[in-house]
Image: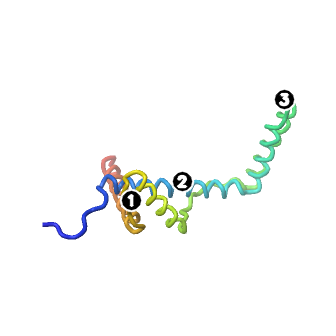
Amino acid sequence: MKRGRKAILTDIQRWGVGGFCEDEWRKLCEKQTFDRHDALPHMKQVREAQQKITRARFKYERQIHSEKIDVAIARARSNRLARIITVRRPYAEAAPILGRAIFWCWQKYKKRISRQYARDCWDSFRECEAAIVRASGQLID
């Protein structure tokens, strides 16, 4: 005889909440990465030149501004300003993601969960995802 509390969500629903958290986490990682990349000095020059191209009326003007973009990109490469884009984890952003996951769970399943339960769903999703990756690696070998 089972005692204690009944599960709030089924396993599939738990993985759904965990998948939502992971997707939000990855979106935030990518957003922060591209924001960091766009803040570099050479990218500002490229953006300004691109805006001038869109405002240009004549083909000759567009050609001049596109050449300026090429010069700005070449300068960035020569100065080694063009770096490989690295994705870093946004460590302090887990709480807002969990809050959005709670709201999403309410919208999707009409069930209220706590932050800790959302964290457990996220952890179980990551464990499941890691097990799948390990299993697929063993199949290839």
Contact, CB < 8 Å: mark 3 with mark 1?
A: no
Q: Residues within 10 Å of mark 1 (few under 14, many from 20)?
A: some
The correct choice, above or below, for 96 with respect to 81 in the image is below
Contact, CB < 8 Å: mark 3 with mark 2?
A: no
The one of 135 and 57 positioned closer to us in this rendering: 57
The residue identified by callout 1 is 126
Measuring 72% from the left and 56% from the top, which residue is drawn there? 81
Label located before the other in sequence (2 or 1): 2
Report how far apart the C-alphas of labels 2 and 1 lie in the structure: 16 Å
The residue identified by callout 3 is 59
- Colouring scheme applied when the structure was drawn: rainbow
The one of 69 and 34 positioned closer to us in this rendering: 34
Image quadrant occupied by the N terminus: bottom left
Mark 3 belongs to which amino acid?
A: Lys
The correct choice, above or below, for 119 with respect to 139 in the image is below
Foreground mark, 3 or 2? 2
* Mark 3 secondary-structure assignment: helix
* Residue 137 marker: none
The residue identified by callout 2 is 27
Measuring 54% from the left and 68% from the top, which residue is drawn there? 92
The correct choice, above or below, for 52 with respect to 117 in the image is above
Mark 2 belongs to which amino acid?
A: Lys
Contact, CB < 8 Å: mark 2 with mark 1?
A: no
Q: Residues within 10 Å of mark 3 (few under 14, many from 20)?
A: few
